[in-house]
Amino acid sequence: MQNLATNFQLNQSALGHLTSAVQFGFISGTLLFAILTIADRFSPSKVFLLSAIIGALFNSGMLLDNNNLTSLLIFRFGTGFFLAGIYPIGMKIASDYFEKGLGKSLSFLVGALVLGTAFPHLLKGLVTLSSWKFILICTSCLALIGGILIIMFVPNGPYRNPSQKIEFSVFFKVFKNSNFRAAAFGYFGHMWELYAFWTFVPILLSTYSSIYPNTTLNVPMLSFLIIGVGGISCVIGGYLSIKIGTKKTARIILLLSCLCCIVSPLIFMIDSVNILFGFLFFWGMVVIADSPLFSALVANNAPSKWKGTALTIVNCIGFSITIISIQLLTLLHEVMNPIYIYTVLALGPILGLIALLKKENIKH
């Protein structure tokens, strides 16, 4: 992103706008997809392919030499918008194939998402790879290849129950189911913590380095490892859910990540890189491992003909929540001692745990 700003002579504030444009695009896309019940009225594989093609075109638009901030924001927004036809639709495709063991299936999907999220930190750590145009071309091509593979090898699943018409009221109807609400609120609590943690991992590491100047940290590479290790934990959580149940596994993992938020100030008080690494790697594992499990709970407790729309709605609200928690941490980082700010992330998991405790008959 920094190379992009340099190439088009943008100021530093533009970087934040370009990042936010993708998030707002995704939120807008999931909202519209949910209102129009796209995921349930049309073949998910075809929606995935079309979204991959258009998303890749928007992503490639940033390669144009005559871009300015306005056009770049449009391209970033468009990329985020059509991601709404990829990530939630991918979960819909998985739910159409697995009536049981959905948590394990989604664990692989979310694990791939985690690696994709961590990948930019790896690229930043590899200083020899500096061509932002090459990266854009590669990501756009990979999106196209992914869409083609889905349409070629993943037809409509055996458990797909398509809806025949637009039902604008679905956005509100799904929340009338108390079991669905409990699963969704658990997911919302998880999302309050997740993206704020991921965003602030480099800042957390830099803060530790400033407290202990003799400590040398490769912040980009460590950020990649701390975030990327979550891909492994997602798969582990998926298999664990088969043994002890999806809801129980999600609840245990959410509790562990909550405890990490609460004890985080203590880590800054210990001059030990090994303890820092061990703690952050553990936090990086538990902060995401419950994500596919909550998505499975949401899918399993939604009406079958609205399953895709329900997943899209929950994604829309969940990612909207991430903007609030990220902005809150940004504000707190400026007005108080930064070693204490991560405790506020415990609020989401606490509320999520309360929601899960209220209902014991959630389908899993």
Image: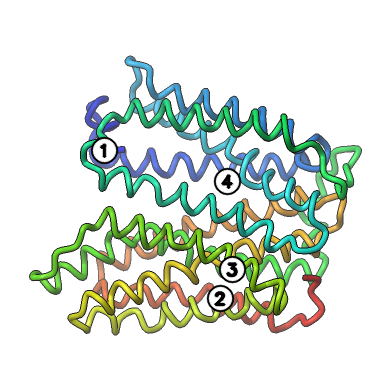
The residue tagged 4 is 27
Estimate how packed mark 3 is, as few (under 14), some (14 to 19) or many (20 or more) residues with alpha carbons within 10 Å: many
Query: Residue shown at 67%/77% (left/top)?
Result: 355
- Vertical order, 173 against 249 (above or below): above
Query: Disc 3 versus disc 4: distance between alpha carbons?
Result: 21 Å
The residue tagged 2 is 254
- Amino acid, disc 1: Gln
Q: Are marks 1 and 4 in contact (CB under 8 Å)?
A: no
Q: Is residue 225 left or right of residue 334?
A: right
* Res 153 → quadrant: top right
* Res 9 → quadrant: top left
The residue tagged 1 is 2
Estimate how packed mark 2 is, as few (under 14), some (14 to 19) or many (20 or more) residues with alpha carbons within 10 Å: many
- Vertical order, 259 against 133 (above or below): below
- Vertical order, 266 against 152 (above or below): below
Mark number displayed over residue 275? none
* Res 363 → quadrant: bottom right
- Vertical order, 312 against 339 (above or below): above
The residue tagged 3 is 290
Which of the two labelled residues, at mark 2 and mark 4, occupies the earlier sequence position? 4
- Amino acid, disc 2: Leu
